[in-house]
Amino acid sequence: MTNRRSPRPQTKNNNEHNLEDTILTMASEDKATGIPDDVASMWKTLDPAIRAALIASESKEAEDGKKESSGGGAEGRRAKASDGPRMDDTTSKFIGGDSFTKRTKNPQWIKVRSDVYDAVKVRRQQELDAKVPVDIEVTMPDGKILSADKEGNKYQAWRTTPFDVACTISRGLADNTTIARVTYTAFVSDYDLAEDGMEAVDTLADAMAELSVEDADDDTKKMTMLWDMTRPLVGSVSKMEFLKFDDDSDARTAFWHSSAHVLGEALERLYGSRLTIGPPLAGGFYYDSYMGESSSDGAFKEDDYKVVEAEVQNIVKQKQKFERMVVTKEEALEMFEGNPFKEQIISTKIPDGSRTTVYRCGDLVDLCRGPHVPNTGRIKAFAATRHSATNWLGDTENDSLQRMYGISFPDKKMLKVWQENQEKAKERDHRRIAAKQELIMFHELSAGSAFWLPHGARIYNKLINFIKEHYWKRGYDEIITPNVYNLDLWHQSGHAMHYKDAMFCFEVEGKEWAMKPMNCPGHCLMFAGKIRSYRDLPLRYADFGVLHRNELSGALSGLTRVRRFQQDDAHIFCREDQIEEEVIGALDFMKSVYTTFGMTYKLELSTRPKKALGDIELWDRAEAALARAMDTFAGKGGWRENPEDGAFYGPKIDIKVMDAMERVHQCATIQLDFQLPIRFGLEYNTGIKEEGKQFARPVMVHRAMLGSVERMFAVLCEHYGGKWPFWLSPRQVMIVPVHKEWNDYCQQVKDRLHEEGFYADVDLSKATFQKKVRNAQVDQYNFQLVVGKAEVENGTVNIRTRDNKVEGEKKVEDLIAYLKEMQAEHK
C-alpha cells in the first residue's frame, strides 16, 4: 500500500499565456468596437491554432499532473482517507491469471518473499552502518529542548527514535502514542532523500489520499513529516508532536492504515490472497485482493469473517513490529514476483533507478509509504465488517477482486461503542427509511438517478423553497441555465482537463457536447453577456439546475453518490474590496440553515493544493481574504486550516456539520475563485479614467449551503431518524374519526387544512380507533387529530402528537394559526 500525492501547482505554458493574452487584448480593443455577445463567441473568434493549442496544453497538463501525482520531492505528510484506486492503466485488462487458483493456507511464495526481504535488509543495514551518528536536539511543542535520555545518553541522528524521546518524558506517553509529527530544523549531512526513498513515486498514488503537507514555497511545512515512532531521526527537530488515536485524525488514519496491513497478512496466511491495495478510510479500512474470478470458490462469504478475525487476533498477540525498509525498483520487482498487481504498480509507478519503501509485519511485506504503529499489539480490537466484489483500478473490464472491510481500535470498549452506533445507524439508514416511508425509488434503467415519489418530492421541494426564501431575503437573483453545452465551454473553463471522465459526453452534428456537471461556466457566460459596471457588483446568481456526473456504477450509493442531482448552487461576482463582506454573508447564511436543521458545524480553510491553477500571488490574496472573513465571523481560533486541500481553482471554506449521531458531513462550501474570471476574460468597468485602470476582474465566489439536495436529504433523513420536523414533514396531519358518522366532518377539516397548504390525510379505513392512531404514529404523522361527537359539535379537533402526547382540544382555525406559526418558525 502507498499513499496518494497530488500534483504540484501547475504553471502556465506558452499556449495558455497566448490564449489569455489574446482574450485580454480582444477585451481591451472591444471598448471601441463592442464586446462580443458572449464569451463563447470570443472563444470561437480565436485563431483555430490557438484553440487547438489550449486544448492540447490542457491534455498535456492533465498528463503531467498524472505524472506529478506519483512523484516529487521530500514529503512532509498528513494522513487522509482514501476513496479507492484511480490509477491509469494501458496494459492488459486481465493480469491475475493463475496467480491464484484456489484457497491455500500459508502458500510457499510468502517464504520466498521473506527470504528476498531478508537479503535486501542486509544491504540496507550495511548502508546504515556507514552513517555517522551526530548529536541532535529535539524541541517539544512547549518549547522545551531535549538532547539526552534519562540516563544521559545523547540523542543522535540514525540512532534515536521518537519512541526514545517519548520515553524520556514517560514510558506511558511512548506506549500510547500512535505516530509522531516531526518538523526538522535541518537534515544531517549524510542524509539523502532519494536514498531514503523519500523522492520516489507513491506506488499507489491514486489509491490513497495524499499524505503530504509539503508546500514547496514554505520551508517549515516542507520539513514537517509524519514519522514512525520506531524510525530513527535524521536531524535536529524544531518541533516534535506525539499523536494519539483519541485526539488526532492523522493518528487514526495511520492506525487504520496499519490495521489494513494486518488484515492483508491474515488474508495471505488463510487463503493465499494476492493483495492489491488496502488503504485506510475516513472510518476504517479495506483490502482488495485477487482470489480468482468472482464465480470461483475464492470469493468472500460472511462465514469468513470470524476466521479472519481469529487470525488477526493471533497476529496481534504476536506483537509483530512494523519495520520500514527502502528498496530499489529491481529489488521490489524481485520481492513481489508472482503478484501481477504489485508488479504492475512497481513497473508503471516507480521510475528506473529510483527507490521506494516497503513495510514488514510478521510474514507480510507490502509496498507502503507509512507511517505505522510500532507493533501489531497496539490493535486491541478488530472486526471484519463487510465484503464486496470490485475490479482492479475500478474498471469493470479488469480483473474481478474481493474487497474486505474492517474496523479497529486501540481499546475494546471503543469497538463496542462503534458496533452499537452501527446498529443505530442501520436503523437510521436513509435507504431504509426512504423505502419504508415511500419517499424515493431507484430503477436499473436509470441507475444512480432517484425517482422521487410524491411524499419524497414534498421534502425535496420544501428544502429548495427554504433556500429560495433565504435567496429573496439575502439579495440573490435566481437564474435558469442550459443542461447541455458544447465541450468547448469546458475546455475554456479548464473542467474538461479535470472532470471529462466524469461527464456524460455525446456528439451533436459532428461536435462533442456534454451534460453539465456544474453550473459555474454557464454563469460566467451570463456575466460576460454585457458590459458590467462596478456599480453592478456584487451579482449573486442562484441556480437549481439539474447536474449530471458519470459516477462508476460500483460507487453509486443511495442518495449520497448519484449521477443526477441538483445543488443550491450560487455564484457571487464581486470586487476585491467586497470579498470579506460577501463571505461573511455566506457564512451567516450557512449558520442560519444549519441552526434550523439543529446541527452544529466546524469551519476549515482549505488552502492551495499542488494541482492548483494560476499564480501564487492570486492564491495568497484569496486565502488571506477568506481568513479575515472567518476571523470576523468565528473569531480567531474559531476555525482551522486544512493545508493543500483547496480546489484546483481557488481556496475554499469547508463546513463540517455534525448530525444527531455526531457523525461529520461535508455539505456546505464557500470557494473563492480567481481563475474562471481569467479564463473567461471577465471584466467590469471600474469608473476610473486613468489608463490601464478602467477595467478590473471580478472575484468569483462559489457557494452552496445544502450542497446537493439529494445528499442533504439523505443526511437529514438519518439526522432526524425519519421523524421529520413539522415544517419539512411530508405527512403533517392525520385526521382520525372515532366513528364513521364523523367522516364527513373529518373530510371538511382535511380540505380546510389543504387550502392552507398543509399535508393532511383522513383515515377512513375499517381499522379500530386505537389502530388508526398507532398507524399514524408509526407513519410519522406529526399530529393526529381525533374527531368524535363533541369535536363535531364544537367545531374543534383533539390533538395528539406522534409521541402520543395529548395536547387537547382546539378550534380548527386556532389549529391552523398554530400550524402556520410552526411552519414559519421552521419547527
Image (tube, helix red, strand yellow):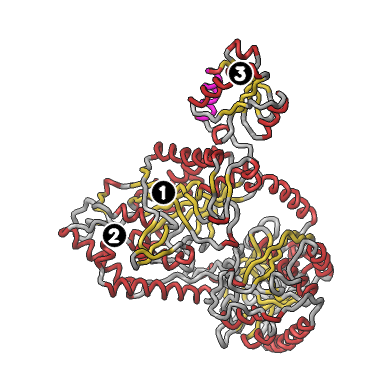
Q: Nearer the viewer, residue 135 or 737?
A: 737
Secondary structure beneath disc 1?
Answer: strand
Q: Which residue is mark 2?
A: 39
Name the front one of labels 1 and 3. Answer: 3
CA–CA distance in space, label 3 to label 2: 61 Å
The answer to whether residue 339 is magenta is no
User: What type is the residue that disc 2 sits on?
Assistant: Val
Residue under the image location 70 percent in, 29 percent down: 774
Nearest to N terminus: mark 1 or mark 2: 2
Element type where label 2 sits in the image: helix
Residue named by callout 1 = 570
Q: Which residues are magenta?
A: 813-823
Q: Name which residue lies at 36% across and 74% down.
A: 13
- Tell which tag, 3 or 2, sits nearer the viewer: 3
Q: Using the image, tell me which numbered label, if any, was put on residue 797.
A: 3
Question: Of all residues shown, which one is farthest toward the top?
Answer: 793
Q: Amino acid at mark 3?
A: Val
Disc 1: CA contacts within 10 A as few (<14), some (14-19) or many (>=20)? many
Of the pair 493 and 457, the residue shown nearer to us: 457
Please tell me in which quadrant of the rendered image residue 798 appears.
top right
Quick check: marks 1 and 2 in contact, CB under 8 Å? Answer: no
* Picture coordinates of residue 647, whole percent (x, y): 47, 61
Residue placed at 56% from the left, 50% from the top? Answer: 656
Looking at the rendered image, the disc whose residue lies closer to the viewer, 1 or 2, is: 2
In the image, is 272 to the left or to the right of 525? right
Marks 3 and 2, the one that precedes in the sequence: 2
